[in-house]
Amino acid sequence: MKSSFFSQRSDLELSLLFLAVVVALALTGLAFDSNWPKFLRVATAFVGYAVVLLIATRRSARPPLTAFVLAGAVAGLLSGLVRPEPMPMRFVLTLTLAAAALLGPAHFFGLKHAGRLRQRMLSV
């Protein structure tokens, strides 16, 4: 069985679940440090990323890269806007573009190659 792309929506949902566990661990550390502003930023950015990605891909068995880029941009924008101290708009824009260029594509290509990696691991 050849799988050159993440084959099912369940792969996307599973990856978001894994990411949610990682974010929950980070939020736990932030809560123990009583770093509530950063807790709010991380939680808001993750929820925004996950919601936008699930909505943008709900009708697609093979979600396009643009859906991941959009979700990354939303995460970056929310993270920039939820900061307790006012930030210059150019900083928020830079954060938005960086998240769109890094977070979304990293998730997309990770999912794209996870099927092949899984096949290699199971065939050994």
Image (spheres, rainbow, N blue to C red):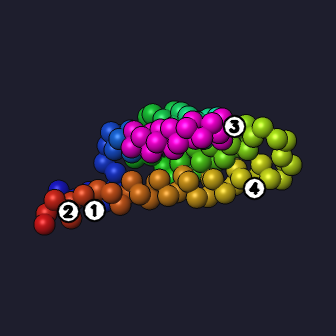
Quadrant of the frame with the C terminus? bottom left
Q: Nearer the viewer, residue 64 or 75?
A: 75
Element at label 3: helix
Q: Which residue is mark 3?
A: 37
Q: Is there a contact, CB below 8 Å, between mark 2 and mark 1?
A: yes
Kindly identify the amino acid type of the residue bearing the numbered disc 1.
Leu
Residue visible at 45% across and 34% down in the picture: 58
Looking at the image, is mark 4 or mark 3 earlier in the sequence? 3
**3 or 1: mark nearer the eye:** 3
- Comparing labels 2 and 3, the label whose residue is closer to the camera: 3
* Marks 2 and 1, how far apart at CA: 6 Å
Q: Amino acid at mark 4?
A: Thr
Q: Secondary structure at mark 1?
A: helix
What mark, if any, has residue 117 been given in the picture? Answer: 1
What residue lies at 69% left-to-right and 37% top-to-bottom? 37
**Mark 2 in CB contact with mark 3 (< 8 angstroms):** no
Picture residue at 83% right of the left edge, 53% below the top: 90
Element carrying mark 2: helix
Where does residue 42 sit, x and y in percent of width and height?
60, 41
Q: Is residue 50 left or right of residue 1?
A: right
Q: Are marks 3 and 1 in contact (CB under 8 Å)?
A: no
Compute the Cα span from label 4 to label 3. 20 Å
Nearest to N terminus: mark 4 or mark 1? 4
Expressed as whole percent of the image width and height from the top left, the position of residue 34 reads 63, 36
Residue designated by label 2: 121
Q: Nearer the viewer, mark 4 or mark 3?
A: 3
Label 1: how many Cα within 10 Å (few below 14, some 14–19, many 20+): some
**Which residue in the protein does label 4 denote?**
94
Number of residues whose C-alpha sits closer than 10 Å to that of mark 4, classed few (under 14), some (14–19) or many (20 or more): some
How dense is the environment of label 2, judged by Cα within 10 Å: few (below 14), some, or many (20 and up)? few
Q: In the image, what residue type sits under mark 2?
A: Met
